[in-house]
Image (cartoon, helix red, strand yellow):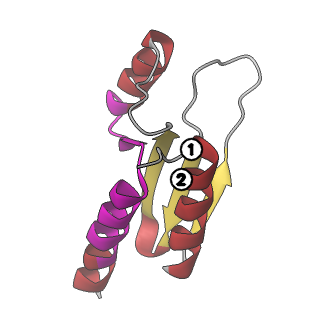
Amino acid sequence: MELESEKDIERYLVDQVEALGGLCYKITSPGRKNVPDRVCLFPRGVTIWIEIKSEKEKPTEGQIREHTRLRDRRHTILVIDTKDKVNILIKEVGYELFERI
């Protein structure tokens, strides 16, 4: 079985977030390394930072430090390395969105 590439997972994430009515911005931060790849803004104020990796790839030590910095400020950061994990995210967020209505 072929491993899923970071590019394929990222494209799939963007498509799925947008299908749920959200926005999925690519993030670059001049002067700050290791910021997560994407920030997903879902309806009703749900915001999730996403670090995208190729299947079975892990975050670097610098990325882990940055994730901790954001989590310490009560932000949600997920590391996603498969399309299946994107599906789980979308299912959970969709449930949250509809439960709040």
Q: Residue at x 57, y 42 (%)?
A: 6
Question: Which residue of the protein is positioned furthest toward the front in this rendering?
Answer: 1
Residue ID for mark 2:
9
Query: Relative to 24, does residue 1 appear above or below in the rendering?
Result: above
Q: Residue at x 45, y 56 (%)?
A: 47
* Coordinates of residue 15 in the picture (x, y in percent): 59, 70
Front of the two marks 1 and 2: 1
Magenta-colored span: 71-94
Query: Relative to 77, does residue 34 appear above or below in the rendering?
Result: above
* Coordinates of residue 20 in the picture (x, y in percent): 48, 79
Question: Which residue of the protein is positioned furthest toward the left in this rendering?
Answer: 99
Q: Residue at x 27, y 68 (%)?
A: 92
Left or right, residue 43 beside residue 91: right
Left or right, residue 82 beside residue 22: left
Q: Residue at x 77, y 23 (%)?
A: 30
* Mark 1 Cα shell of 10 Å, populated few (<14), some (14-19), many (≥20): some
Residue ID for mark 1:
5
**Of 86 and 73, which appears nearest the observer?**
86
* Coordinates of residue 74 in the picture (x, y in percent): 32, 38
User: Does the residue at mark 1 contact the one at mark 2 (Cβ under 8 Å)?
Assistant: yes
Magenta stretch: includes residue 52: no
| Residue type (three-letter) at the residue carrying disc 1 | Ser
